[in-house]
Image (cartoon, rainbow, N blue to C red):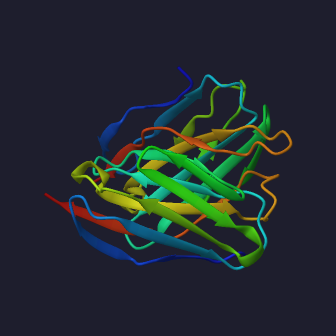
Amino acid sequence: EAQVTQNPRYLITVTGKKLTVTCSQNMNHEYMSWYRQDPGLGLRQIYYSMNVEVTDKGDVPEGYKVSRKEKRNFPLILESPSPNQTSLYFCASSYTGSGAYEQYFGPGTRLTVT
Amino acid sequence: GIQVEQSPPDLILQEGANSTLRCNFSDSVNNLQWFHQNPWGQLINLFYIPSGTKQNGRLSATTVATERYSLLYISSSQTTDSGVYFCAVPRDGSGNTGKLIFGQGTTLQVKP
């Protein structure tokens, strides 16, 4: 089954404790991206990657890191989480070939930073 | 940048009723997606519809790219249709970079 998976689905942590949210897709997509969703602010892009070893900032990259060492994986790293990073996070992927830009989203990760 | 507006922001229906949700966008795009976010927060792909009309069961969507809008039709609504409906378009219009701009969503509540 074609899918995007994220882990963990739920996480409660404390300020300053480094964490990683994993994202994996099995569709051989070149493009992967992270979004956060907050009430009243909608979905905003954090980082994206056009292919292996190619990453760039989205709209709200501060406080986050990413890496793309393999095509299927795109982890999101919070080196020192703060309460304002409490949010619902989504990973997404798509092809970048001509005319096929449909994005597929993972199930989401609810993060609470106390 | 491209602006995306959805209407109405909120909608309450009785089970069995039909509805139309609208998505307007401010610039030319060559792809558009509709999503349903269920009460558990999951984003479900409904349609990838750069232009024309598609149907999937009780749902259908129409995009008129030249007039910069898309419509999502829900017929014979069910309580499981409740949630938030988003449309999204490429930030750069073409989709080449993969960046999406989301509308603010329409929150639908279907009452039994």
Image quadrant of residue B31? Answer: bottom right
Across and down, in percent, residue A91 comes to 54, 42
Give the answer, above or below, for where A6 lies relative to B106.
above
Q: Nearer the viewer, residue A74 or B106?
A: B106
**Is residue A81 something that shows in the picture?**
no
The residue lying at 24 percent from left, 58 percent from top is B16
**Is residue A57 something that shows in the picture?**
yes
Looking at the image, residue A43 sits to the left or right of residue B74; the answer is: right
Looking at the image, residue B3 sits to the left or right of residue B1; the answer is: left
User: How many numbered circles does the render carry?
Assistant: 0
Q: Nearer the viewer, residue B25 or A15?
A: B25
Q: Residue furthest left?
A: B112
Report the quarter where the C terminus of chain A lies: bottom left
Across and down, in percent, residue B33 comes to 60, 55
Image quadrant of residue B29? Answer: bottom right
Give the answer, above or below, for where B69 lies relative to B111.
below
The residue lying at 40 percent from left, 73 percent from top is A40
Give the answer, above or below, for where A60 lies relative to B59.
below
Q: Nearer the viewer, residue B73 or A12?
A: B73
Looking at the image, residue A12 sits to the left or right of residue A79; the answer is: left
Across and down, in percent, residue B89 comes to 66, 62
The residue lying at 32 percent from left, 57 percent from top is B83
Looking at the image, residue A44 sits to the left or right of residue B84; the answer is: right
Across and down, in percent, residue A77 comes to 54, 41
Give the answer, above or below, for where A79 lies relative to B4.
above
